[in-house]
Image: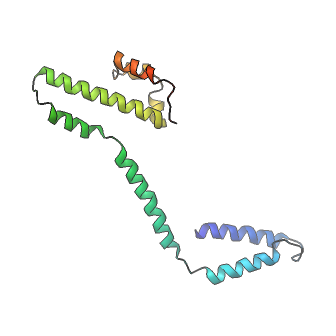
Amino acid sequence: MKIAEKMRFEVLRTKYTSAKNKTDCLCGRWFEEVALYCRKHGDLIPVAFILGFYVNIVVSRFWQQLNSLPWLHRTAFFVGSMIHKRDEQGRVLRRAIMRHLTVAYILTMKDICPPVRKRFPSLQRIRDLGRRSRVDVSIKRKRKGRVFM
């Protein structure tokens, strides 16, 4: 806040001092009034107080966005605790569920996050990494053209 005020003050001071005739300058008397006003009322609102509100808003918004992201490890723990089979069929089922959730997460993040879009520019790139099956490709083709960003 003080930096912005100082910048405005310097711009006005430069205009005022660069004018040849102080009475002809549009901002001549006005600059002097603004300078007196700033000197008189400069300490009424503490900048740290206002800055505290701003930082609180920024941090709380970041925290809300961070908490709204789906974390796959939480879902993996849940899937592992709900599917109790200890044989090959249970392992394949758990892996299939997590693979589909990972693909859904990649497709969602690809639409809203530029680094993910850069990492996975095409469906073929995701398929080459072994993260997609033919079913996943048909689902993505149905939603083609829906980009959120």
- Give the residue furthest to the front: 142
Answer left or right for 39 relative to 102: right
Tell me: residue 37, above or below residue 60: below
Answer left or right for 7 relative to 83: right
Query: Measured from the top left, where is residue 58 in percent x and y?
Result: 46, 58
- Give the residue furthest to the left: 86
**Quadrant of the image occupied by residue 100:** top left
Q: Residue at x 20, y 34 (%)?
A: 79
Query: Measured from the top left, where is residue 40 in percent x and y?
Result: 64, 84
Q: Nearer the viewer, residue 143 or 127?
A: 143
Q: Nearer the viewer, residue 141 or 118?
A: 141
Q: In the rendered view, how is the structure colored? A: rainbow
Query: Measured from the top left, where is residue 114 in percent x and y?
Result: 49, 36
Tell me: residue 77, above or below residue 27: above
Q: Nearer the viewer, residue 4 or 147?
A: 147
Q: Residue at x 15, y 30 (%)?
A: 83
Answer left or right for 25 relative to 62: right
**Quadrant of the image occupied by residue 136:** top left
Q: Residue at x 71, y 69 (%)?
A: 10
Labels in figure, total: 0
Query: Measured from the top left, where is residue 121 in percent x and y?
Result: 48, 26
- Give the residue furthest to the top: 134
Question: Which part of the image, by quadrant, shows the N terminus?
Answer: bottom right
